[in-house]
Amino acid sequence: MSSDRYPFREIEPRWQKAWEERKQFTVTEDASRPKFYCLEMFPYPSGRIHMGHVRVYAIGDLLARYKWMRGYNVLHPMGWDAFGLPAENAAIEHGVHPAIWTYENIDNMRTQLRRMGISYDWERELATCDPSYYRWEQLVFIRMLERGLAYRRRSTVNWCPSCQTVLANEQVEDGRCWRCDSEVAPKELDGWFFKITAYADELLAWCDRLPGWPERVLTMQRNWIGRSEGAEFDLPVVGRPDLSLRVFTTRPDTVFGMTYAVLAPEHPLVDQLVGDARERAAVAAFRAEVARESEIERLAADRPKRGLRLSARVVNPFSGAAIPLFIADYVLMGYGTGAIMAVPGEDQRDWDFAKAHGLAIVETVARPDGWAGEAYTGDGVKINSGFLDGLTIAAAKRKAVDWLVEHGLGEARVNYRLRDWGISRQRYWGAPIPVLYCDACGMVPEAEANLPVVLPRDVQLSGKGASPLADAASFVNARCPGCGGRARRETDTMDTFVESSWYFLRYCSPRHEAGMFDRAAAEYWMPVDQYIGGIEHAVLHLLYARFYTKVLRDLGLVRVDEPFTALLSQGMVIKDGAKMSKSKGNVVDPDELIRTFGADTARLFSLFAAPPEKDLDWNDHGVEGASRFLNRVWRFVLAHLDALRAAPGAARPAAADGKGASPPGPGAARPGGADREGASPREPGAARAGGADREGVSPREPGAARAGGADREGVSPREPGVARAGGADGGGASPHPSSIDPGRAFRRTIHETIVRVTDDIEHDFHFNTAVSAVMELVNALYAFETASLDRVPHGERLALLREAVETTLLLLGPFCPHVTEELWAQLGHAESLFREPWPAADPEALRKQEVTVVVQVDGRVRGRLVVDVDAADDRVRQLALGDDRVRPWVAARTVEKVVVVPNRLVNIVTRS
RNA sequence: GCUGGUGUAGCCCAAGCGGCAGAGGCAGCCGACUUAAAAUCGGCCCAGUGGGGGUUCGAAUCCCUCCACCAGCACCA
C-alpha cells in the first residue's frame, strides 16, 4: 500500500530545508506592504506534540501561507511557554533539573514541529524561562507596583494540595485544580495580586468591540467579569446607634419587601452583634459547620439553605420596621458587602429561606394573572411599596436610589464577580517576583539596574511545603536596593500566565535588548490579526492577555487597546467519542502519523474532517482518504508531466483567436467580487472576500488567465432550450444534454473553485468545504482529461489541463505545502509556489449562458428546463406549462398560480 | 436553574436570501484493469433534516413548543 504513495518521505524534508535556507518566511517590518500577524497559542514544552497541536498549527499555517500569497508581509512566529509545574514535578520524580528537562523537551518538540513544515520565522523563537525574556515582566511588575496595579495582601486563596501552590480563581474549575484535578482547599496566605478589577469595566466594554471573536468566548468573558448594577446602603442595628450594616442589592425597588437581612457567616460585624456567651457558642458552631463544607459541596445545586438567627435586629429604613437578622451559608463574604437585604417575594433564594424559617413574605410587584410561582422576578407594577407604588421596576429603582442618597443612607453601586488576579505561586520554576523585604525599609522593589532577578540553578526540590526558593540562601539573602542593608528576597514566583500575557509583543522584536520590545516594531506588527487556540483559554489566558496589554498601554509602552483583533477557537480532537488521552488509550501520535502518511496528509485531514471551531472526530480511514487524494493529484501531474510542461502556459492563451473579451477591470476579477451565478450581483464585494484586504494586493492579471479562445457567446443567440427541454421523455431524472462546450464548462469549474475556496477561507474559516471544492476540481480534472480527448481542440485542451492543475496546486498550497511546492517545481516553475499570487477568478469564465430551472407542481419536482440565464419570467412560465413531463400533473387540475424564481425554479400551484 | 451551541445518509460533514435535501470524504456494493489480490479508474445504493405544531406556492433554513447531547456559568444578592 505504502509503496503506491507519492514519495513524501523524500519531498517533505527537502522542501523544509529549502524554505529554511532561503529564509523564505523570515520577515522584517516593511511599511510598503500590508502586514498580517498570524499567531497560534504557543505550547507548553511537554516533550511531544499531540494531535491538538497538529490541528491548531495546520490552521495557522494555512492562514499564514494564504496571506503570503495574497501579498501580505506575514509575521508567523513560534516559541515556548516554558515555565510551569510539569518541569518541576519531573525534577522531583526523576532528579532532572527543570531547566534541562525543559530545554530537552523544546528541542524535541521543535524537531517535531519542523517536520510539519510550518512557515514559521524560526529566528524569532523564544522561551519564556530565559532571563532575557522574563526580566521585562519583572520591570513591568515594578511599574505596576508603583501604580498600585500590583499589591500584596493576606487573603483566603485557592490552595491546590497536590501542586502545592495557590491558584487564581480562573484556574479553579468546579472546585478542582485546572491542571491536576485535585480538590482545592481554602487557605489564608500572603500573596501578590494584579489589580485586574481596575480594568473590569474596560474589559467588559471591549467585549462589544471585538467582532472578530467568537460570541461564545465573549459571552464567557462577560459572564466571568459579572458586572451588576444596584445600590449599597446601611441598615441601622436596633438599639445600637454605633452600628449599621451595609448591604448590596440589584433590586433597590424591592426594599419595601425586605422582611429580614442576612450576613455571611464570616462577616466581621457578627462578633459585635452577638449578645451573650450562648449565642457566641452557637455562632461558632454554625461557622464551624459551614467551614467544614468543601468547595465542591458548597457548589452543589439545590442544597437547603442553612442559617442561624441572631438576637440583634436591624431596621428597614424604608418601612421603618425592625426585622430579623440571620447569618446564613447562602450569603458569601466575597461578593458585594457580604450582607444582603432579603426580599423573599422577589428572590427565590430568599423565598426558600423564608419558608424554611417561617419568615414574612411581602409582594412588591403585581403578579400577572394566573401566576402560580413562588418568588416573582418578572416585570410589573410596584405594590405594597409606599412612595414607589404604581411605578415600573426601572422607575422604582431610580427613585429608591434617589431616596437613599437624599437621606444619606446609600448610593448607586456597581459590583463585579471578577476578583483581582492572584499571581503568587509557591513554586520554583517560574519568574521571580522582583521584590525584597528589608528590616529598615520594609518591602522594596529590586533596583532596575539589578534586573533580571535570575532564578538560581542550585535549588533543592522536595515537592513539599513552601516555596523552594526560601531554602536557597544565596538567593534569599540579598542587599536592600534602598539602604544597602540586609534584605530577604521574595520567594514566590509569578503565575506562568504572566509570561503568556505578552509573548505576542516580544515576538515583534524578540532580540531587543533595550526593553520589552522595540516600539516601532510593535507598532508595525500589533495587534495580532488572527489568533488561534483552544477554547479552554476563553477566560484564562485570553482575559489575562487583554488585561496585561491594557496595562502596558497605560504604562505608555504600546498603543493598542486590545492584543487580538480576531480569534479562532478550534475544537478538540476526539477519537472514539472521547478526548484523546493516554488513560483512554485513544491517542494518535503525530510523529507516527507523519512517518506513515506524511505531514501534508496529516494536515489535510486535520483541516478537512471538520470545520475548525467544531470538535474533530479522528478517523483512521479518513486519514487514508486524505492520503489517497494527494496521491491522486500527484499521479495526475506526473502522468501528464511532459504534456503539461509543453502546454501553453496558463498565462498564455493557446487557441487565442483574438476574439476573447477584453480583460475586465481589476475590481471585477476579485475572487469574492465575481458573482457565482451570474445572476443579480450581491452587495458589491464590500464585506466579501475581496473587501477584506484591498490594500493594493494586486490580483493576477485576469485577462492573462484566459485559456480557450473558443467563445460561443458572441455567436447567434440560440433559441432558449425549447427543443431540449421537451426532448427527453419520462421522469425528471433523465439528464439534459448541455449545449455548453466541455472546455468552457470545465473552465468555469476551475474558476468557480477559486471563488469557493477563497470565500471559504476568508469568511467562515470553512477549510473543510474548501478542501472538498478542490477535490471536486480534481474529480472534474480526471473526467475532463478522458472526456475531452476528441471534443476539445488539442491546444485548448492542454492549456485547460495546465490551468486546472496549476490552479489546484495554488489553491491547495496552504493546506499541503510540500507536495504542492514539489509539483509546482516539476511543472517547471523556478519560483516558489508561495511567492505566487493567489489565483483570481476570471468573471468571464464564471459567466453562465444557461441554467437548469426546476419545474414543480404543487411543490413537487416534476421536470426541468434548460433556459438562457435571465430568461424572461413569462417565457419560462410558458415553457414550464408546456413541458411534456409537467403537463400530465397539471392536466386534470386548474392552475391557480405560477411562481417563477428567476434562474432557479417554477412552481405551478393547482387545485382540483 | 441560566446562557450559548449542536441535532441532516451506516459514519465525518455540505446545503449566504426560504427555492431540486447532497458538495466532499469514509464505509458498503457493482463493474473495468489483474493469473489473483492490492492499488487504481468508472459507476451505484443509502436520509426527507431530533419530535410535534404554525407561517408560506414552497421550510433543514422563519416562528412556537417539546426532546436529546455538548459547553460555559451558577446560592453573585
Image (tube, coloured by chain):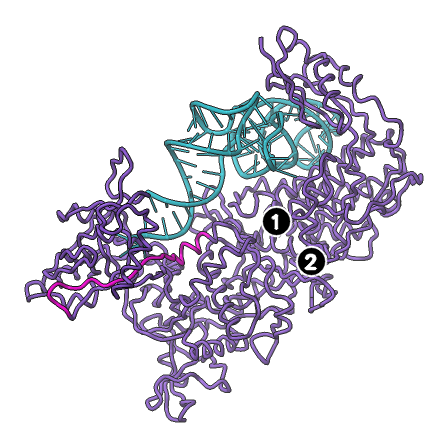
Give the vertical position of A91 relative to A174 (above or below): below
Q: Quadrant of the N terminus of chain A?
A: top right
Q: Is residue A228 magenta?
A: yes
Q: Which chain is purple?
A: A
Q: Which residue is mark 1?
A: A602
Kindly identify the residue that appears in the image at 29 percent across and 37 percent down. Answer: A368
Q: A475 and A599: which one is in front?
A: A475
Percent x, y of residue A533: 53, 56
Q: Which amino acid lies under the numbered mark 2 shown in the image of this protein?
A: Pro
Q: Secondary structure at mark 1?
A: helix
Colour cyan maps to chain: B
Badge 2: chain ID: A
Whether residue A414 is situated above or below residue A450 in the rendered picture: above
Residue A172 vs A471, above or below: the answer is above
Q: Which mark is residue A13?
A: 2
User: Chain under label 1?
Assistant: A
Residue A101 can be seen in this image: yes
Residue A569 is inside the magenta segment = no
Which residue does the image show at 70% across and 20% down from the upper left? A864
| Magenta stretch, residue numbers | A219-241
Q: Position of residue A817 (x, y in %)?
A: 69, 53
What is the quadrant of residue A18 in the picture? Answer: bottom right
Q: Amino acid at mark 1?
A: Ala
